[in-house]
């Protein structure tokens, strides 16, 4: 049967995937966000994952961008790429996944395949999503319809490691479907695929990818805190240790974003539900979640040391996104620094040339500057480089001095300045 694919959720994951599939298949890109669909139909991708040329190219290839259920009724492969966030208690919020499954169930037909790409804990596809599909469709799993799982491996802002160039894990609910899902992805993924033995194995593989990174970064962050109390430069220590061939070279910093700062909670939730306390993983999360507060406190101490007032001081934070050269604000930990500084009574200005100011309303609870602070006359008591955007890498020491109020206090979280007042 000829494949007609529907990709549900046109964010950082879904849009590049839909574009890649559109070069070989008939594709419908579905999103419940009306303005998102309208922008894409006009050739604009606010995530900047696709250029205007690429968006228009996908439409030329026959791809339809839609928010209408009737446009996906005749598809036979549904790929779900919706967010899997956490709530205020760090518990998995499966609402987008459940609602997507309920929606797909309304149009599901005999022998259709539903593939999930959203990061989850092992068991979600078959224990949470499948019952929703069965209930909404009135059909039976692995008899009338089938499921697959192929965890996303998108790296936002990375123009080198794009979706087709990253090896993809695949899995299916039966051996035959597993092969069918694998062949589908293999047809567009030039880096190849790895067919997992089961959907649960594929789910587990994805969630530990980011958990491992989270734990490793937490170790480096804890070392940075220790070395800071000793008066030792952490980066000098890392450079020395990295001369050993098998040393894993990581840098300390904020751990936010849609994956590393979220995925471990999916695993710890399921582990605790089963009666196991994942102390190492939870400890790593605690360390990484505390870095923003530490950076803010360090800034305040340095200001006090310089004899600067704290209440009503002016502090500039450069960068708001969770990573460099990318407009992605999801789960950015820069907010932790800002919140802490606000608690001290400081006036905080935030500047990020990459951020779409409309997106700020959805993912950021602070107002951003709409003008470059280096082009204004306002002076700052302290400057914090929170994100290593290329625009900030190019700045000179004189640039920072020009907007400093008295003695320059420059906090460099990303290690991009030669002579900062303090570097993490």
Image: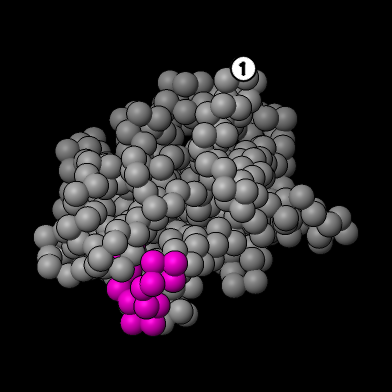
Image mark count: 1
Residue ID at (22%, 44%): 396
Residue 181 x, y percent position in the rendering: 56, 32
Badge 1 density bin: few <14, some 14–19, many ≥20, Cα 10 Å: few
Residue ID at (38%, 32%): 162
* Image: magenta residue range: 304-317
Residue ID at (65%, 71%): 89
Residue ID at (30%, 59%): 408
Residue 275 x, y percent position in the rendering: 88, 59
Question: Per the image, is 11 magenta?
Answer: no
Q: Is residue 186 left or right of residue 31?
A: right
Q: Nearer the viewer, residue 369 or 143?
A: 369
Q: Nearer the viewer, residue 382 or 168?
A: 382
Residue projecting furthest to the right: 275
Residue 214 x, y percent position in the rendering: 62, 46
Question: Per the image, is 311 magenta?
Answer: yes
| Relative to 312, residue 273 above or below | above
Is residue 101 among the parts visible in the rendering? Answer: no
Colour mode of the rendering:
one colour
Q: Nearer the viewer, residue 28 or 212?
A: 212
Residue 16 quadrant: top left
Residue that numbered label 1 is attached to: 245
| Relative to 382, residue 245 above or below | above
């Amino acid at each position: 049967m000829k494949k007609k694919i529907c990709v549900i959720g046109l964010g950082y994951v879904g849009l590049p995937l839909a574009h890649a599939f559109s070069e070989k298949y008939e594709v419908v890109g579905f999103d419940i966000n009306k303005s998102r669909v309208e922008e894409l139909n006009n050739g604009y991708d606010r995530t900047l994952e696709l250029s205007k040329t690429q968006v228009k190219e996908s439409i030329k290839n026959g791809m339809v961008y839609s928010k209408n259920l009737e446009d996906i009724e005749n598809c036979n492969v549904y790929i779900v790429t919706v967010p899997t966030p956490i709530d205020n208690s760090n518990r998995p919020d499966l609402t987008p996944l459940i609602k997507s499954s309920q929606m797909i169930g309304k149009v599901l037909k005999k022998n259709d395949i539903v593939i999930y790409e959203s990061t989850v804990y092992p068991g979600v596809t078959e224990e949470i999503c499948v019952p929703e599909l069965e209930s909404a469709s009135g059909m039976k799993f692995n008899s009338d319809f089938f499921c697959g799982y192929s965890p996303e491996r998108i790296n936002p802002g990375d123009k080198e490691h794009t979706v087709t160039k990253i090896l993809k894990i695949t899995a299916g609910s039966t051996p035959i479907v597993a092969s069918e899902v694998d062949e589908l992805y293999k047809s567009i993924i030039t880096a190849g695929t790895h067919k997992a033995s089961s959907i649960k194995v594929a789910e587990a593989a994805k969630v530990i990818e980011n958990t491992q990174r989270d734990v490793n970064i937490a170790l480096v962050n804890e070392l940075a805190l220790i070395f800071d109390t000793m008066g030792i430069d952490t980066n000098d220590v890392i450079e020395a240790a990295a001369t050993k061939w098998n040393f894993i070279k990581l840098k300390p910093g904020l751990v936010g974003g849609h994956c590393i700062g979220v995925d471990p909670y999916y695993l710890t939730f399921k582990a605790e539900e089963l009666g196991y306390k994942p102390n190492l993983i939870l400890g790593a999360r605690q360390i990484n979640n505390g870095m923003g507060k530490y950076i803010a406190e360090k800034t305040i101490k340095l200001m006090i040391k310089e004899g600067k007032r704290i209440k009503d001081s002016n502090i500039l934070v450069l960068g708001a996104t969770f990573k460099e050269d990318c407009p992605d604000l999801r789960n950015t930990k820069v907010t932790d620094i800002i919140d802490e500084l606000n608690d001290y009574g400081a006036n905080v200005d935030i500047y990020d040339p990459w951020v779409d100011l409309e997106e700020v309303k959805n993912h950021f609870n602070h107002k951003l500057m709409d003008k470059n602070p280096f082009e204004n006359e306002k002076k700052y008591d302290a400057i914090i480089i929170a994100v290593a955007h290329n625009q900030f890498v190019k700045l000179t020491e004189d640039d920072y001095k020009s907007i400093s109020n008295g003695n320059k206090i420059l906090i460099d979280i990303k290690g991009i300045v030669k002579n900062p007042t303090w570097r993490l």
